[in-house]
Image: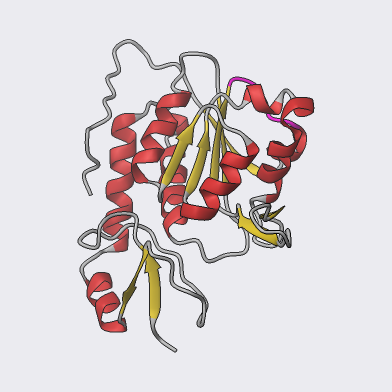
Amino acid sequence: DGNSIQQLQNPPSEIGGHRCLLKGEPIPPSYATFTPRDLDQIRSSIDPADLYRRMVSSIKACLYFPEENDFICDVLALFALHTHLLFSETAVYLHVTGRPATGKSRLLEVLARVAFVPQLTCSTTKPNIFRRLDSSGGTLMLDEMEHVSGNSDKHGDLLDVLRGGYRRSTGVVQRLDTAKDSFDPIDFDCFGPKVFGSIGPLEEAMSQRCIQIATYLMPRDEVRKIPERVPW
């Protein structure tokens, strides 16, 4: 009906990413409402092209890539924007891979500064994943993914959640409500963008869902620093 309900990453004075609700859905406490006039004022104050250019420039200042692979900074900026404007039926996955000490964890840290509600961790479980994503949404970032992907016997359930979470139709985990005698099923929404960091390759099914991002050893004469706050 022209009205929009948007989720806030920050307090109401600052606008983070957004996720639209269907008309008639209950409004969670973490959501705030905006009128069309409010949204028009927000849009008029932001130049998308300028914002994109500043994001690319800032990412380049934090991360090193050889000149011929400089376009990766554009890919990372587009991914970050995608996490804030996720209206499609499919979410983007990134796989950050490279030799030790080439900046994989650093890249995830930089993305965590610009992605929507970043959930950065290097150790987690299936229940933690689906409960956290269902309650707050956002962008899941798993570092040291080789410990998970290389042990399907131990982490098979977690991998199933990650494999299915790139599509709305398959990104739902169902559990029984043990707090009630009826044991009614409860759906947990695990759909959303995700980033995985690892030294080696992921298992095939996961790898096919990811855009591959390679990291490189930074020359000693190069200097890259991550600012305390992003400049936008």
Residue farthest bottom in this picture: 1
User: What range of the chain is rendered magenta?
Assistant: 199-203
Check the image and tell me how it is coloured: secondary structure
Please, is residue 120 above or below residue 86 in the view?
above
- Residue 32 falls in which quadrant of the image? bottom left
Residue 84 visible, this orientation: yes
User: Where is residue 83 drawn, in percent x and y?
Assistant: 46, 53
Residue at 21% in and 44% down: 231
User: Where is residue 211 drawn, in percent x and y?
Assistant: 60, 41
Residue farthest front in this picture: 181
- Residue 14 falls in which quadrant of the image? bottom left
User: Where is residue 169 drawn, in percent x and y?
Assistant: 70, 62
Q: Nearer the viewer, residue 94 or 28?
A: 28
Q: Nearer the viewer, residue 214 or 21?
A: 21
Q: Nearer the viewer, residue 154 or 220?
A: 154
User: Where is residue 220 drawn, in percent x and y?
Assistant: 33, 10
User: Does the stretch in magenta take in 201?
Assistant: yes
Residue at 57% in and 50% down: 92
Residue 209 visible, this orientation: no
User: Does the stretch in magenta take in 45?
Assistant: no
Residue at 24% in and 63% down: 12
Give the overall secondary structure of the magenta segment. Answer: loop
Please, is residue 16 above or below residue 70 in the view?
below
